[in-house]
Image (spheres, coloured by chain):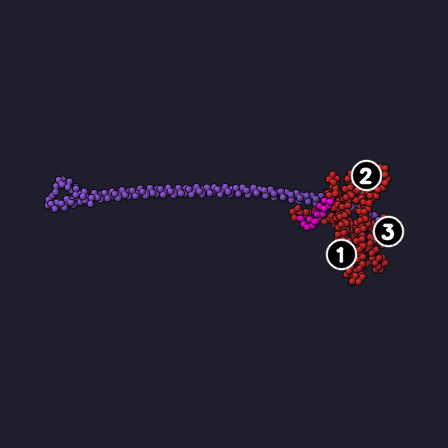
Amino acid sequence: MNINATLIGQTLSFFVFVWFCKKFVWPPMVNAMAERQKQIADGLAAAEKGQQAQEVAQKEAAELVSSAKTQAAEIIASAEKRGNAVVEEAKESATSEKERIVASAQAEVDQGVHAAREELRGQVSSIAVAAASKIAGKEIDQAAHADLIEDLVTQLKAS
Amino acid sequence: MASENGELTGAGYINHHLTNLTYGKFPDGSWGFAHGAEEAASMGFMAIHVDSMMWSLGLGIVMFLIFRSVAKGFSTDKPSKVQCFVESIFEMAQDSKDSTFTKQAKNEWIAPMALTIFVWVFFMNLMDLLPVDWLPEALKIAGFEYMKIVPSTDVNVALGTALAVFIMIIYYSLKVKGPVEFGKELSLQPFGKWLLPFNLLLELVGLLAKPLSLGLRLFGNMYAGELIFILIAMMYSAGWGLGLLGGFAQLGWAIFHILVITLQAYIFMMLTIVYLSQAHEHH
């Protein structure tokens, strides 16, 4: 309980400690804390910026997707149209080809029929002449009886 | 257990615990350690409490070692728990200064000083929580006759710290306001120039009351707390029943004392800041 030189000693040590704290302890800690505060602030700002960029990108992506969808729909529609047209064309060309083939076949057939008929007619007329001459017992003058024979052939033809 | 003449007496035990290890000049002119409170008192001012100074300086150094290790291993993105704790104390000191000082009164010294006061006084008070006999008895084996391990229960330490604050109050008053205005402040209020001597007396008492109340508040609280710890410790030598009761009493008082030592350290810091902010303000 005695007041003595300890009082002065404590006062001096107090000043030394305060000086030491101000010079060597306070600045590094406070600077480091300030640096961290800045880092946190920067980080938050960067995060916000990133979020904004992401929102913009999302919007852009949505726009791209929707435009792509429209384009795809258009392409599909035109392809369908084109397909239908191709089918129609093919159908038309097939029909005309068929008609052409049928017509040429018909013509060939007609031709064949006509030739066969002509041949047949010739043969019939000669057979008729032969038969008639056999029946008449003499040669029929082909020239004299041409009209008759012709008439006969016509009748045959009609039959 | 110790007493003046080897007997185990309550008064002797308490006295032993309340006596500092004193080194000083005997009345006959020789220097040496005092054996007993009477001898220490006879030395007058030319003596120093070796234990108080040793613990006070040692705890201050421990404080700075902790700060240094935290500052060295400072990590901005992965702070350790100790670092977070130390940071919050730094911020507390800075906030206390910012909330009291006006924006114009810039002083880079106040916040580090507040930090030093708070942590140092807290560490000195913290020694109070150690059981009162442990270190003194251990150091007795090492040859120290007396040992008070709580520096803030030494009135010299408490008043010495307050004296340093007082010197700073005077220094900043003179530096910021100038001698003329500081002198006017002391002599021309509150009653005007016709009652100048009375004003001066009033203001000087008020000025001197600042460091005295600051130091004696800390000393009184810590001294009383220490005394109660010593009284509780006496119960251990009074049989099993009282000893057990003493154990609970010490636990309860120690838990309560955690609040007291923190509060006293905080009050000391806060009042210092307030006094110094007054020294910076123009009236």
- The disc label shown at residue B185, or none: 2
Q: In the picture, residue A146 is in which quadrant? A: top left
Q: Chain of mark 3?
A: B
In the rendered image of the structure, the colour used to display chain B is red
Which circle's residue, 1 or 3, is located before the other in the chain? 3
Which circle's residue, 2 or 3, is located before the other in the chain? 3
Residue type of the residue flagged with mark 3: Ala
Q: Count residues near mark 3 (Cα–Cα under 10 Å), then give few for <14, some for 14-19, many for 20+.
A: some
- Same-chain check, marks 2 and 1: yes
Tag 1, which secondary structure? Answer: helix
Q: Which residue is mark 1?
A: B252
Residue type of the residue flagged with mark 2: Glu
Q: Chain of mark 2?
A: B
Task: Say if mark 1 contacts mark 3, CB within 8 Å.
Answer: no
Q: CA distance from mark 2 to mark 3?
A: 40 Å
Residue type of the residue flagged with mark 1: Gly
- Same-chain check, marks 2 and 3: yes
Kindly give the residue lying farthest to the left in the view shown.
Answer: A137
Q: Position of residue A93 (x, y in %)?
A: 35, 42
Report the span colored magenta. B79-97
The answer to whether residue B95 is magenta is yes
Q: Nearer the viewer, residue B206 or B114?
A: B206
Q: Position of residue B103 (x, y in %)?
A: 73, 40
Q: Chain of mark 1?
A: B
Task: Say if mark 2 contacts mark 1, CB within 8 Å.
Answer: no
Q: Which residue is mark 3?
A: B41
Q: Count residues near mark 2 (Cα–Cα under 10 Å), then give few for <14, some for 14-19, many for 20+.
A: some
- The disc label shown at residue A111, or none: none
Q: CA distance from mark 1 to mark 3?
A: 35 Å
